[in-house]
Image (cartoon, rainbow, N blue to C red):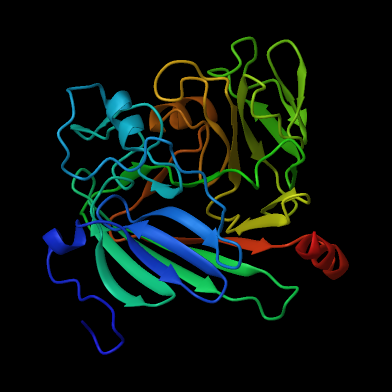
Amino acid sequence: MTEAGLPEIQSWDDMLSGTRTLSNRSLSLTYLPGRGGSITGLRRIGDDTPILWQAPWGIVPIGATRPPATASVTAHEMWAGGWRTLYPSSGRAITLYGADMGYDGEACVAPYRVEEQAPDSVRLRTRLVRTPVEVIRTITLSDPEDESGAATVRVVETVRNVGQQAVEMMWANEIVLGEPLVGPTTTVDTGASVVRPEPDTTHSVSYDDLMPWPRSQGKGEMINLRRVPAKDAATSWQAYLSDFSEPQAEITNHAAGLRVRLTWDGETMPYLWYQMEAGGRQDFPHYSGSYYLGLSPASAWPRQGLNDARRISSTAQWLGAGEELTTWIELAVSDPRSPEEIAAADQA
């Protein structure tokens, strides 16, 4: 143990051993160095309220024996929800520079080394194998400045090309929000101006069916993205938001006493992937039982892989030899109720 009482990270075996925890007075966060440095859980300490959605099948242990499967099945099996990095691709498995990049890219499954850790912050680093890129991920918790303020999680990421040739890339942070924040009384507000539907989810539409926020084309109907459907709505949809007046999204459930405000670096990530799942996906892995809202600041669209980002939207980009890019995302948790409403609820 270190003088601060923190575990020393001495080997890859130690690093792969399981989840670790950060906390302050307001929030408790779990992360998994051995699988993408992903944030696997986030809770408000006062009432132990979860913020992020966690897959009901839990976290499949690293190294667990599993039946042979396709890249897509394997990726969904290992996906546990939470907050993770997608790089250098996302969605469909692709082959790039003679290597299979897998489903959702390498960064979300790579083992990360813990370089620095404090009770409320950690810096992780990995060197990807299938592209010559180093990823540095710093997670920091902050308490609110006053009782009416917000507790925050801030993630700062750097990707650095340590090779001698330029490599193509797309980059996103996938953040999956769950109950009780996500519910039929939840509202979603964003600074977006333009909405593009995802034909993979809504087969009767195309990427050219642009709509102004908060409207999107659904299956034979117009969808209001500001509203969250009920858990048993048997629906799901996905859209791409762009042309932000301010790169931010605010998710509020007044009845649950929860508000989450996402802000991010709109220069490196000018898009937001919006995914609503309310029992609409049959068969593996959801079996019509998942209920979450995914919001992913991203450098490119669509989510269906680097090849589509290059072919459809021309949003794939190049990271030159020796070049690095840094971005940030902040999630702020607060209570939208007035002090009087909070006091009345506490007495009920």
* Left-right relation of 132 to 298: left
Q: Position of residue 229 (x, y in %)?
A: 71, 29
Relative to 232, say whether 170 is above or below.
below
Q: Quadrant of the N terminus?
A: bottom left
Q: Nearer the viewer, residue 177 or 183?
A: 183
Q: Position of residue 210 (x, y in %)?
A: 72, 26
Q: Position of residue 65 (x, y in %)?
A: 14, 34
Where residue 329 sits, quadrant-wise, is bottom right
Look at the image and tell me whether residue 325 can be seen.
no
Residue at 49% over, 16% down: 282
Look at the image and tell me whether residue 331 can be seen.
yes
* Left-right relation of 313 to 36: right
Q: Nearer the viewer, residue 90 or 300?
A: 90
Q: Quadrant of the C terminus?
A: bottom right
Residue at 44% over, 75% down: 120
Q: Position of residue 11 (x, y in %)?
A: 12, 66
Residue at 75% over, 73% down: 148
